[in-house]
Image (cartoon, rainbow, N blue to C red):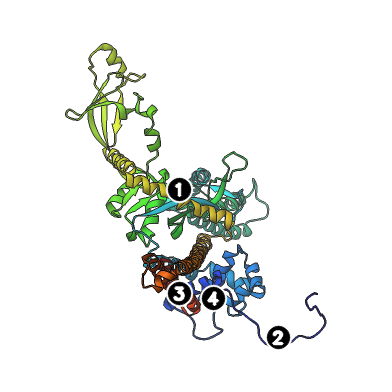
Amino acid sequence: MYQNYTIGQTEFVLNYNYDLPQNHVARLISDFVDSIPQDVLLEDSRAATGRPSSHPAIMLKILLFAYSRQTYSGRKIEMMLDENLPMRWLAHDYTYSYHTINNFRRSQHASKLIKHAFVYFTMALKDHGLIQNDAVFIDGTKVEADANKYSFTWRRAVEKYHAKLREKTSKLYEELVEKQVVQEMAPELVTSAEGMEVMEQELAEKITKLDEEIKQEPKIIKGGSVRKRRRRFLKKLRHQLSNDLIPRAKKYERAEDIFQGRNSYSKTDHDATFMCMKEDPMMNRELKPGYNLQIATHKQFVLDYGLFSNPTDTRTLVPFLTQFHALDFFKHIVADAGYGSEYNYTMILDQFEKQPVIPYTTYQKEQKRKFKNDPTKSQNWQYNAEDDYYIDHLGVRFSFYRYSRRTDKYGFERDFKLYRADKHQLSEQLDELAKTPSGRQRYMQVNPTWNYYKAKVKDTLSSDEGKAIYRRRKFDVEPVFGHLKRDFGIRRTHLRGQQAVENDIGLALMTLNLTKLGQSISRLETNFINNLKSGLRFLNQSKIVVQILLLENQKLIVNSQPHFGVLFYLLIFLCFTVIFHFMVAEIDSFSIINTCTFKNIVSQRIAIINT
């Protein structure tokens, strides 16, 4: 027997069921978005007339659900609104074009809304005890940009050719001033595109004036017309300015504005920077346009994220911690050795007042026996704190010489102590060893502040608490990137521009959070049900045991000789019966999920599990 399959007949459907399972991720997404206040969801200024705009709550719901199904194309999301039942349930049967979807997820309001969503998600986790106050884990990864990998522009090349262009323009300006064609200008204006346009305008005026004078000249002039020769010369210079110098100057100036301190950018995505990626199939360290993604996690939940153009992680830690909204929840900041620097340690301890659990670059190397027994390392030299001098492995004495302060290109100052080898050592042989091959005295430098931070980090990482915290980094923040790139397939961005890419990554990370939370709750519910079944089996076995004991001891009970073993099993049976009915009643409480907010759902489920 087969199901009824009749085609070509008119069907009349009275009811279309939009109901979803209680544990469906669409319900969790809907409840989470509805928990965000309306004053955050809605824009501050909106026109009161005209066609109503798409509600941000609905747009956020459909984008989160689409990302949970690994659908990132605007056209495919539009198709899901017609064909996917959970998507239609979330959108309240509204349909939106891909233009509307793409415009929303790259807008400034969407950026603000996604940032607030992470704040409310973090607060929900904190309110329900899913966040401890011990440590937050920070790490970064590079995401390839949606840009042509061969459309690069390098700052060094632009600076080189722009300098040559300025030199060429200066010579041209001096020639025009010498021939009294243009008036004198400020030196900084001469080499700019604006100054070149002024020179071109003055040349055009001179050429126009010469045209009028040439019209009044006789047709034949002995030896040729001087004004015509001058006009040809000025036209040549004007052509050179308008077709070569001015366009190149504008291009270089525009490129320098786009760089904003970076060394490169892509022509198809100006916010993307060329950097090395881990995915390098050619094994030639090919540079590709991309972004540096930084995230802060706790128990594999992403609490905040940031997108930076720095290829290295060292200079991204302080800006990221400055924007991190939940920094006050934690005592320790945990990261890998790529974040260990004097500047980062100073900011974490002094400004943020947190404890860094971040090894420096050479921490693992310094723990090895080979390094500790290497006499050429200055850390292993003999030091006299009273007289402040070092003695190296050759026996050369280095006495304190002077203090030195250095400022890096980012403006951070470092204080050093310089030690110089004494000119008069204990022997002539040491006098020779105290000099460089060129005959100068040897120097060594020590950074006391950096040594203090290194010792402090060593003590932290060597303690039992520090080891336990740093050990968690491997299975807390690292798996998040694995889920993002492998499970969600986001190895390359889907939009272009800093804000659009940041929104795109934020939606993916929030979807990852909600998916993980839903799976965790479902897993806890499954374990809870399995425990109930085990308790039920134990209860049935207890019934059988009690019945056997009652039959065997029936004679003693009739003769008013109570058996305490029977009474004990009866008491256990009664207790398990009460507990079982209580747990079944708690299971029935899951039926009210539809009427609860996101926070209430999380709190109810966690409370039931704890009970």
Label 1 sits on a secondary structure element that is helix
Residue tagged 1? 474
Residue to which mark 4 is pinned = 58
Q: Which amino acid does label 3 sit on?
A: His
Q: Is residue 322 left or right of 76 when viewed as pictured?
A: left
Res. 305 image quadrant: bottom left
* Residue type for callout 1: Lys
The quarter of the displayed image where residue 431 is located: top left
Camera sees residue 182: no
* Label 1 vs 2, first from the N-terminus: 2
- Is label 2 or label 3 in front? 3
Q: Which of marks 2 and 3 is nearer the N terminus?
A: 2
- Circle 1 residues within 10 Å: few <14, some 14–19, many ≥20: few
Q: Residue 335 location, x and y as percent? A: 40, 48
Q: How far apart are marks 4 and 2 (CA)?
A: 27 Å
Task: Identify which amino acid the numbered label 2 is placed on.
Answer: Val
> Do we see residue 140 in this rendering?
yes
User: Which numbered tag is attached to residue 13?
Assistant: 2
